[in-house]
Amino acid sequence: MERPADSCVEILERLSPVLPAVLNAYRVPEPRAREIVDDACRTLLAKRRLRHEDPEGWLLRTIIESCRRWQKEEEREDPPE
Amino acid sequence: MKIHPNDDVLEELVLSLDEGHRSLLRHLAWCGYCRSKLHYLPRPLPLHPRDAIGNPRAGSYEAGLAESRRALSEWEAVLERERDDAPGLFVELFEQPAEIRDLLLRDSPRFQTWGVFELLVERSLEASVQDPAFGERLGLLALRLSDHLDRGRYGAERIADLRARAWAFVGNACRLRFDFQGAEEAFGQAYQQLKKGTRDGLERAILLDLKASLRRDQRRFEEALRLLRRAVELFTSLGERHRAGRSLVGLSIVFNQMGKALDAIPALQRAIKLVDPEREPRLLLCARHNLAAYTASAGRFLEAQKVYQEARSLYRSFNEAWIQNRRKWLKGQISLGLGHLRQAESLFLAARDGFIAEGIPYDTALVSLELALLYAEQGRTEDLKRLAAEMVPIFASRHIHREALAALTFFRQAVDAERAGAELVAKVAAYLRRAEGDPGLPFEAGNGTS
């Protein structure tokens, strides 16, 4: 029998100990961090029927990629001296 | 590092590690979650000018994350409701004539939901297996619906991702009904949508895997292999073991069609370890069956028998004639290779009768020729003639291409003239096997080969 998939909230909950460190590592400001996390979670929710085998890994990777993109954009606008 | 490390470098690394670190390395090899953490570990960072004016500290994110969890919970419930309602709306939609359907999708907000969009896309792929034209219609309907979805509510990039998938499924449906030009155009659209999407590697890998099937059917094998290898790499990096296994099965089919069954074997062995038997038991059966068949075709009959025996319980779970006839055919080939001629003959006959009953002329012809080879090798001319006479229904079929019919006619005439020796039968059989995926392959009656 197919096991029921964890809810996205549970997945996000499991990542909660790691996420502040990730966001802090990229020095993402709090409001932008919230947008990044919300967006990644909404994308995961929209794709739940793809039955990700590793939804936590997918979510973490997506958040990290968004942080990296944000950092690159920031550096383009405000390059470090 | 810009290039893949060679074996020596990797070996040196592994040998330099103690057991604990080797175990950690093995864990990293399969755990996408832990691998993704390597993007930000180790943590020490260069000082950024922003630090001087206050760097957000980890603790300050907690409140935002808690708020995200609350909002997410509400949105999850909304999408669940939409998904629950979608099958009913789907039925309602298809109770209407086509023109009303379009109007409903355009004007009725009840239908303009993620749930309906997603269901139409999924059904497009599922339906294409039995009825590609219907699958294509469903995909196009999903795309028309997506024009009316609320971008603010669902997110323009997420809609683009699902539109990319819908176009890929339309492309797949076109391929299945041999409209390769239509398939090319649909895959082109899919790539365009992917560029507007969330840059999700999983969507890209799904697209690559489907496009590889088009390249395979177009006999552009090297391109098909390249796409499938990239798909396997992406799926593996995302922790999608089952999907990686599926692409490896696809890779093995391409190798086999290229006449490289030996290259197909390791791909299948790898696939069998990755495919989830609970998620798609039919795919696992397909992988095990093909592994036994390719191993047998390489002349490794004892090994093929072992693989076949390992698949027996799976065969029992699928009692469909289509599968059982192929099982008998394969078992006949293995029996023949192991020298059990009587058993092989009765299995080939059973498979052939099954294919005739099912109305599958090409497989009937293929298994009949294997039986013919067995008779020819034993000098059983009368049995050969009877077999050739029983092949008459194949000639009446519209599903056998012209060149294959020429080969079969050549075989029949040779049997009638008692000129059909084992070598001739083997050549016609080899031609038919090669021509199965290549209807344009010419048959040259002069020597019975192409």
Image (cartoon, rainbow, N blue to C red):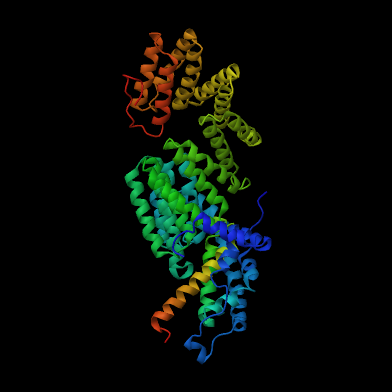
Where is B390 relative to B178, above or below?
above
In the image, residue A9 lies at what x, y percent?
62, 68
Q: Closer to the camera, B62 or B103?
A: B62
In the image, residue B289 lies at what x, y percent?
56, 35
The image quarter in which residue B29 lies: bottom right
In the image, residue B410 lies at what x, y percent?
36, 17
Quadrant location of the C terminus of chain B? Answer: top left
The image quarter in which residue A69 lies: bottom left
Tally the marks. Answer: 0
The answer to whether residue B156 is seen in the rendering is: yes
Where is A1 relative to A46, above or below?
above
Please name the residue shown 59% across and 74% down the image. A19
Where is A56 relative to A26, above or below?
above
In the image, residue B364 lies at what x, y percent?
47, 23
Q: Is residue B132 left or right of residue B8?
A: left
The answer to whether residue B103 is seen in the rendering is: no
Q: Closer to the camera, B74 or B361?
A: B361
Where is B259 relative to B189, above or below?
above
